Image (cartoon, rainbow, N blue to C red):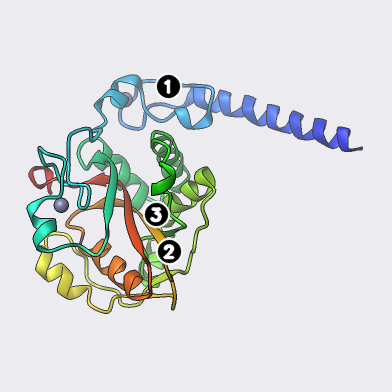
Amino acid sequence: MKNFYNRLKFNQSFAYHKLQQWLNATLPCALCDAPAIAGQNHDDILLCTHCVALLPWYTTARCPQCALPNLSGTLCGICLQHTPAFDRTISMFRYAYPLDRLLHQFKYHQQLAWGALLANALLKQLPDLPVTERPDVLIAMPMHVNRIKQRGFNHALELAKMLHQAWDIPLEIEGCMRVIDTPMQAGMDMKTRTRNLRGAFKSQPSWQGKHVMVVDDVMTTGASMHAVAKVLKQAGAAKVTALVLARTLKNEEG
Ligand SMILES: [Zn+2]
Ligand SMILES: [Zn+2]
């Protein structure tokens, strides 16, 4: 009987795989109309080879804490002077074309399945974390319930779910909540953002000694990440790592 179920499972996955292959072959690139790469995996699609080459991979030396570029690759002056509450930032991309367009589609146009596929493909590029860097728990950058209602989902949570599956690290969906719906942050400077975020987040009572990784799509000034990391540390977190798909660099803002 067990054998029968195994075979059934195998046949189902085979059929699924074939269906995906067919879907892949018919999908155009998300940025231009060229045929997208159709690989063995369902997440190899969405972009054509030309657009993949255009992705703004973040490869240069940077400050390990805030991930802003810095020739020496050591802590930058800003982090030394005004140490953020998070200890490290991992970012795969610079927030630039064409990634900005793709993330925009994912966030504001309800392209959840499509965005999830993209994010999954991007997250696959993440190197395996060394054992010492592995967090104990993952959380997503919290979004206020009003905003979730408007948008239909929390995009950061979708990313965190994928990491949770890929790395087998626990995900605390309600580990930290956004309790005040602050105004949109775009265009505000760091000081105004920080002031607006006072009291905006509420953490679960204890993260005693835990290394928490906070997942988000883009880090712009880092003010939200700082505010979240602060409440996590107040609740006893030993270390907070920010993991973002993209980092906005000063000369690429806007
Ligand atoms: Zn293309
Ligand atoms: Zn820094």
Closest to the observer: 99 or 80? 80
Q: In the image, is the residue at mark 2 within 8 Å of ligand 2 by its beta carbon?
A: no
The spot of residue 201 in percent (x, y) is: 32, 74
The CA distance from mark 2 to mark 3 is 24 Å
Q: Which residue is mark 3?
A: 155
Q: Nearer the viewer, mark 1 or mark 2?
A: 2
Tag 3's secondary structure? helix
| Residue 43 falls left or right of residue 247 | right
| Residue for point 40% across, 70% down | 176
Mark 2 Cα within 10 Å, few/some/many (few <14, many 20+)? some
Q: Which residue is mark 1?
A: 37
Proximity of marks 2 and 3: CB atoms separated by less than 8 Å: no
Mark 1 Cα within 10 Å, few/some/many (few <14, many 20+)? many
Q: Earlier in the sequence, mark 2 or mark 3?
A: 3
| Residue for point 19% across, 54% down | 220
| Residue 42 falls left or right of residue 240 | right
Q: Nearer the viewer, mark 2 or mark 3?
A: 2
When the figure is inspected, residue 232 is found, relative to residue 167, above or below; the finding is below
When the figure is inspected, residue 21 is found, relative to residue 214, above or below; the finding is above
Tag 1's secondary structure? loop
Classify residue 153 by image quadrant: bottom left
Proximity of marks 3 and 1: CB atoms separated by less than 8 Å: no
Hey, what amino acid is under mark 2?
A: Lys
Mark 3 Cα within 10 Å, few/some/many (few <14, many 20+)? many
Q: Which residue is mark 2?
A: 210
| Residue for point 75% across, 30% down | 10
The spot of residue 43 in percent (x, y) is: 48, 32
Closest to the observer: 3 or 146? 3
Q: Quadrant of the N terminus?
A: top right
Hey, what amino acid is under mark 3?
A: His
